[in-house]
Image (cartoon, rainbow, N blue to C red):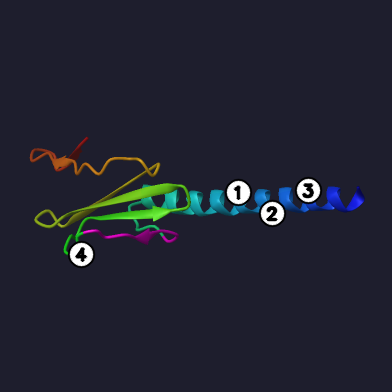
Amino acid sequence: MYYREIKVYRAAAIIALLVIIATVFFAVDYLRVDSGKSPIFCISLDKNGDSIDQELYGAFYKVNKYVYIYEEDTSYEIGPWWMDYDKPELNEKNNQHIL
């Protein structure tokens, strides 16, 4: 009986550690995206291979990277994995993204 309790506690500790690590990864990437920098803990799964815009995947979250070539601007959007990839258009008057 004692051995079984140790296994349960060990499994719970491992799961808690993984949740903490995933939360730290998300927090770091969220702060970087919020300040306009590229995320660190994401990988790119480029389907086309020729696109400048990217979909970056992290642990339970997704970052969309939109590049506006003529305006020399890059914007990021962070959300869940099922978030759609919709590139916002640029408002010509005040040079801000329309969502």
| In magenta segment, residue 57 | no
Amino acid at the residue labelled 3: Val
Please provide percent x and percent y for residue 71. Answer: 12, 53
Q: Main secondary structure of the magenta part?
A: loop
Q: Earlier in the sequence, mark 1 or mark 2?
A: 2
At 69% from the left and 54% from the top, the residue drawn is 14
Circle number at residue 70: none
Count the numbered circles shown: 4
Please provide percent x and percent y for residue 96. Answer: 18, 41
Disc 4: which residue: 49
Amino acid at the residue labelled 1: Val
* Residues in magenta, as a range: 40-47
Disc 1: which residue: 19
Question: Distance from label 1 to label 4 (Cα)?
Answer: 32 Å
Disc 3: which residue: 8
Amino acid at the residue labelled 2: Ile
Of discs 1 and 2, which sits in the foreground? Answer: 2
Disc 2: which residue: 14
